[in-house]
Each structure stands twice: as structure tokens, then as C-alpha cells.
Image (spheres, rainbow, N blue to C red):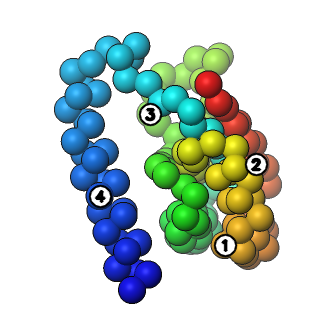
Amino acid sequence: MKDRRTFIKKAAAGVALAGLLPVAKNASAGEVKITGALIHHVFFWLKEPKNDTHKKQLVKALTDLLKVETIKMSHIGFPAGTESRDVVDHSYSVSYLTIFDGQAGQDAYQVHPLHTKFVEENSHLWSKVVVYDSVD
């Protein structure tokens, strides 16, 4: 029963987000805001950045980590092919963005068994991790 509820919640969130995309696309940045949330953005540098097996393992583990109930939105990404400038850092391997309703959700995530398992089972893959947390 829990799996069905989880599916329904995620499906509803996906539909809601999809419904916002046309609004966001036609709206200015000042009109579309995320308020009251805690945004947690993590950048990973793999020890072996050209090792596709390691990159796939990290992405799979990050995807599994998205099962933590307090995560409201997420994105897993890779360096974009944007122009090289002094202020642009393309050196990371994988980025992981999660959005929580607030500090309590992020606090629960940090001690969640899935997060603990993620770190224990995958920390050997990366040489560096940088985290940026922000609130409004």
C-alpha cells in the first residue's frame, strides 16, 4: 500500500511540475520563485572521471537516494557544454540538486538510513565533494 501511495504522490508532483513548465517558460525570472525551501546542491568529483562504470554507479546511487521522503524536487546533472570562462567550473563529474520544504526536511535527510548507506557504499568513488545549501 505504501508503494502505491508513494507512486501517486510522485505522479501528482510530476503532473504539477509539468503544469508549471509552460508558466515558467513564459514568465520572467522575477515571476517564478521558490520560497520557503532549502535548496541543497552537491557537486562530486570522481577519482576516475573517465570511468563510466563509476559514474553510472554514482548516478544510480543518487537516484536511489531520491526515495528519501523529505525530498520534494530533484535534479541529477553533468557539466554543460557552456563556454569556458573564469567564473565557470566544468571540472566536477556529477551534480545533485535536491529541494526540501525547509531545514527540518534537510536535517531528516542527513540522518536518513538511505543517506548513510549512500555515503558508506559510494564515498570511495569521489575525491572531492562540495555542498551549497541556500534558503530565501
**Quarter of the figure that contains the N terminus:** bottom left
Residue 75 seen in this snapshot: yes
Report the residue at 22% width, 42% height from top.
Answer: 19
Amino acid, disc 2:
Val
Mark 2 or 4: in front is 4
Circle 2 crowding by C-alpha within 10 Å: few under 14, some 14–19, many from 20: some
Label 2 element class: strand
Residue 47 seen in this snapshot: no
Taking 113 as reference, is 103 above or below it? above
Considering only order in the chain, which callout, 2 or 3, is on the residue closer to the N terminus? 3
Expressed as whole percent of the image width and height from the top left, the position of residue 58 reads 60, 65
**Quarter of the figure that contains the C terminus:** top right
Circle 4 crowding by C-alpha within 10 Å: few under 14, some 14–19, many from 20: few
Amino acid, disc 4:
Ala
Residue in front for this viewpoint, 69 or 46? 69
Taking 54 as reference, is 127 left or right? Answer: right
Which label is found at residue 81? 3
Q: CA–CA distance between discs 3 and 2?
A: 21 Å
Which label is found at residue 114? 1
Which residue matches tag 4? 12
